[in-house]
Image (spheres, helix red, strand yellow):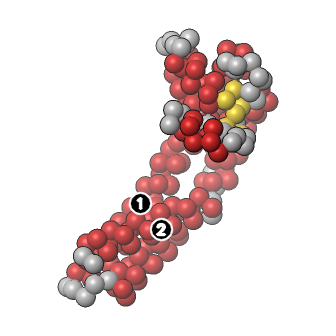
Amino acid sequence: MNAIVFFMIVISACGLAGCLVRRVIPGRDAHFVNSLIAAAVSAFLCVKYGPDSALVLAGGLASAAAVVVIVCGDWWLHRWRIRKSVRASQAVREFGLAKFDILDDDGDGLVSAVDLYRVSASKRFIGADEKMLERIVDDLTLIGHWTPIGPCTAHVLRHVIDNPSHVITREEFETYPQRVKQLAEQMFGEPAAA
């Protein structure tokens, strides 16, 4: 196996594992610990099992550095997304409650991804309301809850929309600001400012 291909595989696997572990173990400094552990495993795998060449040590160090960047970058992007959601949560709540009947395109009492897609495609909202609809679509998994749908239906819908099996109730719009703030506090160990 080519040495560079081997290093790329190790970097990808350790970076992905570090990102997944980071999401399971929350806290203020969890990303540093997780990234260092993933980097150490990456360097060990490169040095121990890497192809015999002069690149092994350099590849191990580069692999460790790349894994730290991947895990910390993922953490930073996730934190940025959650902070953005916290800042917009009160406006999302007010918009969702005020426009619930419009957002619930099929009238079943649940705002689903399919409803949001139809409302968006029909261009019922313009300007600031359109931006708020986009925010709801982006935060669908944070606002609502997962509901089982058939695998065939989910497979077909995934070609059209993201998260076809998430829905939002009126109560979830009502409690969204508190829930997203709690999530930010749990995941990042810091009080979330609205």
Can residue 85 be seen in this snapshot? no
Q: Which mark is residue 35?
A: 2
| Residue to which mark 1 is pinned | 70
Amino acid at circle 1: Ile
Residues marked 2 and 1 touching at CB (< 8 Å): yes
Q: Residue at x 57, y 65 (%)?
A: 21
Q: Left of 171 or right of it: where is 184? A: left
Can residue 6 be seen in this snapshot? yes
Amino acid at circle 2: Ser
Q: Residue at x 52, y 42 (%)?
A: 81
Out of 125 and 68, give the one closest to the viewer: 125
- Point out residue 172 in the picture as x, y percentages from the top left corner: 75, 33
Q: Where's the N terminus, which quadrant?
A: bottom left
- Point out residue 164 in the picture as x, y percentages from the top left corner: 61, 37
Nearest to N terminus: mark 2 or mark 1 = 2
Which quadrant holds residue 97? top right
Q: Left of 170 or right of it: where is 26? A: left
